Amino acid sequence: MMSDKVFNVLFLCAGNSARSIIAESVLNQLGQGRFKAFSAGSMPAGTVNAHVLELLQRNKMPIEGIRSKSWDEFVQADAPKLDFVFTVCDQAAGEVCPVWPGQPMTAHWGLEDPAQVAGEEEQKRAVSNAFMQLNRRIGIFTNLPLEKLERHSLQKQLDEIGTLPRQ
């Protein structure tokens, strides 16, 4: 029997302009109401990468309310209680993260930063690659029997998703 619980998931990246934004949109689409995704950055860029917005719109992914924001918003008293926190960039994974209320499960799902790629076409390709990889990882995540897995087993599976080969 499925639980009615909605799992809150935060995707972290340093700039919160590309990878974490893509992950937020993809999970909100694939999660079919079972998940509520958010994204944030340790040093937010303040804007969402234009190539990311274009790709999300072209793929009919949700973009309403998407914005580049600080992870500080998610440690406030009125912030959503997080069940999972995933870092999608190596820089954020190496930083000292805030203490997340409720001790959510965490994992690192590192990807290449499209914002660091030189050249317009190369950057578009990097955004597309990040989208495909995140779509694959999030698809696996949304199909895990979360209610049936004990914490240690679930943590192992979350970590394994993060080690899927980069394309």
Image (spheres, helix red, strand yellow):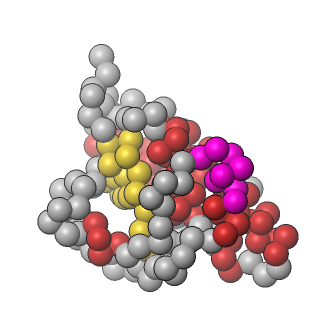
Q: Position of residue 25 (x, y in %)?
A: 52, 51
At 37% from the left and 52% from the top, the residue drawn is 9
**Left or right of residue 167, residue 104 in this image:** left
Quick one: which residue is furthest to the top in this view?
1
Q: Is residue 59 magenta?
A: yes
Res 115 → quadrant: bottom right
At 32% from the left and 43% from the top, the residue drawn is 7
At 53% from the left and 62% from the top, the residue drawn is 21
Q: Position of residue 43 (x, y in %)?
A: 44, 83
Q: Position of residue 72 (x, y in %)?
A: 29, 75
Who is closer to the viewer here, 133 or 62? 62
- Can residue 71 be seen from the camera position used here? yes
Highlighted magenta segment, given as a residue range: 54-61
Q: Position of residue 162 (x, y in %)?
A: 53, 54
Which part of the image, by quadrant, shows the C terminus? bottom right
Res 113 → quadrant: bottom right
Res 147 → quadrant: top left
- Can residue 86 be seen from the camera position used here? no
12 up-or-down from 153: above or below: below
Which part of the image, by quadrant, shows the N terminus? top left
Quick one: which residue is furthest to the left in this view?
77
Who is closer to the viewer here, 15 or 161? 15
